[in-house]
Amino acid sequence: MTEMNQTFEYVELCLDSWDASAAGGSAFENSSSPVNQIKYSWPQYYFTQKNLVVAGIKVVTAEIPFVFDTVTNGNNTFIFTVNGVQTTITIPAGTYTGATLATQLQTLLAAVSGGFLVTWSSTTLRFTFTFAGGAVVWGFIFGSTSTAYSLLGFLPGSTNTQTGNGSFSSSIVASPTGPYYLYLNSRSIGSLINFNLPDAAVSGSGPELCRIPVNANFGELIAYTDPNPEQFFDFFIGHQFNTFDFYLTLGRDQYQKPLDMKGAPWSLKLGLLVYRDASQNLGKRPAHMMKGTTTMIQ
C-alpha cells in the first residue's frame, strides 16, 4: 500500500496559449507581427478557482511548434567590404536551412559586387565564400553580437578579409537554423525560483525557468519532457498561484522577446506541490479538489 503524504499533494496544471486570458507583455521585440497577436506568444493566465497554496513547481512537459523566425531584425546584418567600401547586408527575416541561406547570401552579395559564389557544407557545417572578380580586398565585418555572426559561422567583433580571387570559409561552425535550445520564461515567477544562469549570461537571476532543446526541424513539433522528474523548485512567492505569464526566447546567441509563435498554439504542463487542506485528517477531502482523484507523493 502506498503511504500518502500528510502535508503535500501533487497537482498538474495544463496550459495552452490559446487559453490565455490576456497578454503578458505589450510589444514584440525583433518581430514585425501585429501587437494583437502577442497574447498567443506571451500568454497570461488566471487560476483562482482552486486557490492553491504552492510549495514547489516545475515544468513537466512542453509542446512547441517550430514556426518561429530564427533570423530577425536583431541578428540579420553584417558589413560586406570591397576595396574599402563598406555595405551593410541585411538578410530577410525568416527561417533558413544552410542551403537556402547560402542561396540568399549569394543573391545579396552579388547585388553589391559580381563574381561571388556561396556554398554550404552539411559535413563541416560551414559556408564557403568564393570570389572571382579580380585583385580587390574583400571580406566581412561582424561588429557586435547584434549581427549575423552566429548564422554565418564567425566570431562577434571579427573582421575577415581576402585579397583577390579565392575563398575562405566560416571560421567556426555556423548555425543557419538558429540556436539549439530555447528558454521558457515568466516575468511574474521566473526570477523567484532557483533556475540560474552564470554572471556572464544575459541575466544571472532572470525570468528563465526552463531550458528546452530544439529537437525538431522547421514545421515540426519540439517536444520537451523534464529530465529530472523527482525534483521541484521551491516556490518563493508567498505560496500564492493565481496570476502568471509565460513566454519563450531563443538561445544565447540570438535575441527575440517574446519568441513570435505566429499565432500557433503551444502548450505546457506544470507540476505543482501544494499544501493539503486536510494535513491532519486524511479522511477529509481538500476543499479545493472538486473532481477526480488525487495522486499523493511519498
Image (cartoon, rainbow, N blue to C red):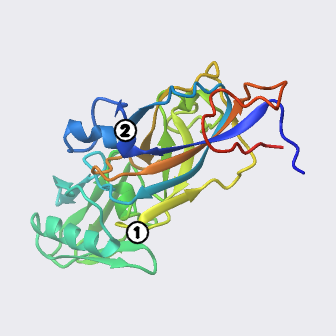
Please, what is the three-letter code of the amino acid marked with disc 1? Asn
Tell me if 228 is positioned left or right of 76 in this view. Answer: right
User: Does 242 appear above or below 34?
Assistant: above
- Contact between marks 2 and 1 (CB within 8 A): the answer is no
Tell me if 41 is positioned left or right of 85 in this view. Answer: right
Q: How many C-alpha atoms fall within 10 Å of the one at disc 1: few (<14), some, or many (≥20)?
A: few
Q: Which mark is residue 42?
A: 2
Q: Quadrant of residue 26?
A: top left
Query: Which one is in front, 171 or 105?
Result: 105
Q: Which residue is mark 1?
A: 217
User: Does 165 appear above or below 235?
Assistant: below
Residue shown at 43%/33% (left/top)? 45
Q: Quadrant of the C terminus?
A: top right
Query: Which one is in front, 186 or 292?
Result: 292
Picture coordinates of residue 281, whole percent (x, y): 83, 26
Picture coordinates of residue 251, whole percent (x, y): 46, 50
Residue shown at 69%/31% (left/top)? 274
Find the distance from the CA under tag 2 to the CA under tag 1: 22 Å
Of the residues tagged 2 and 1, which is closer to the observer?
A: 2
Residue shown at 51%/53% (left/top)? 62
Q: How many C-alpha atoms fall within 10 Å of the one at disc 2: few (<14), some, or many (≥20)?
A: many
Which SS class for mark 1? Answer: loop
Of pointers 2 and 1, the one earlier in the residue sequence:
2
Picture coordinates of residue 242, whole percent (x, y): 52, 26
Q: Quadrant of residue 44?
A: top left
Please, what is the three-letter code of the amino acid marked with disc 2? Trp
Q: Is residue 145 visible?
A: no
Residue shown at 31%/47% (left/top)? 260
